[in-house]
Image (cartoon, rainbow, N blue to C red):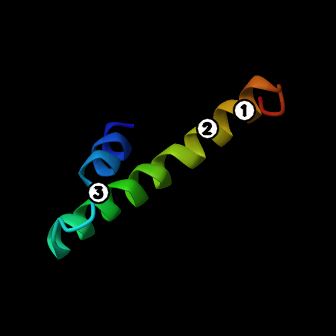
């Protein structure tokens, strides 16, 4: 979650290519961790898993 938060804070116009690339990478990697975690917790919460 901190990667997404820091990525969105550091993503700004005129920040340079490196800054934009690193901010985008932080947001994408954070979402790659967030999406399966939320999906698994919803499946477990609904009682669809063992």
Name above or below for residue 42 compared with residue 17.
above
Depth check, front residue: 18 or 31: 18
Q: Are marks 1 and 2 in contact (CB under 8 Å)?
A: yes
User: Element at badge 1?
Assistant: helix
The x and y percentages for residue 5 are 35, 40
The answer to whether residue 35 is left or right of residue 31 is right
Mark 2 Cα within 10 Å, few/some/many (few <14, many 20+)?
few
Residue drawn at x 15%, y 71% is 16
Which residue carries the number 3 mark?
Answer: 11
User: Element at badge 3?
Assistant: loop
- Which circle's residue, 3 or 2, is located before the other in the chain? 3
Name above or below for residue 12 compared with residue 21.
above
CA–CA distance in space, label 1 to label 2: 6 Å
The answer to whether residue 2 is left or right of residue 16 is right
Residue drawn at x 37%, y 45% is 4
The x and y percentages for residue 7 are 30, 51
CA–CA distance in space, label 3 to label 1: 30 Å
- Which circle's residue, 3 or 1, is located before the other in the chain? 3
Depth check, front residue: 30 or 14: 14
Which residue carries the number 2 mark?
Answer: 38
Residue drawn at x 19%, y 75% is 17
Which residue carries the number 1 mark?
Answer: 42
Q: Are marks 3 and 2 in contact (CB under 8 Å)?
A: no
């Amino acid at each position: 979650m901190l990667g997404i938060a820091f990525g969105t804070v550091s993503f700004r116009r005129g920040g340079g290519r490196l800054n934009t690339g690193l901010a985008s990478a932080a947001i994408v990697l954070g979402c790659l961790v967030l999406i399966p975690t939320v999906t698994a917790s919803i499946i477990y919460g609904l009682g669809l898993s063992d």
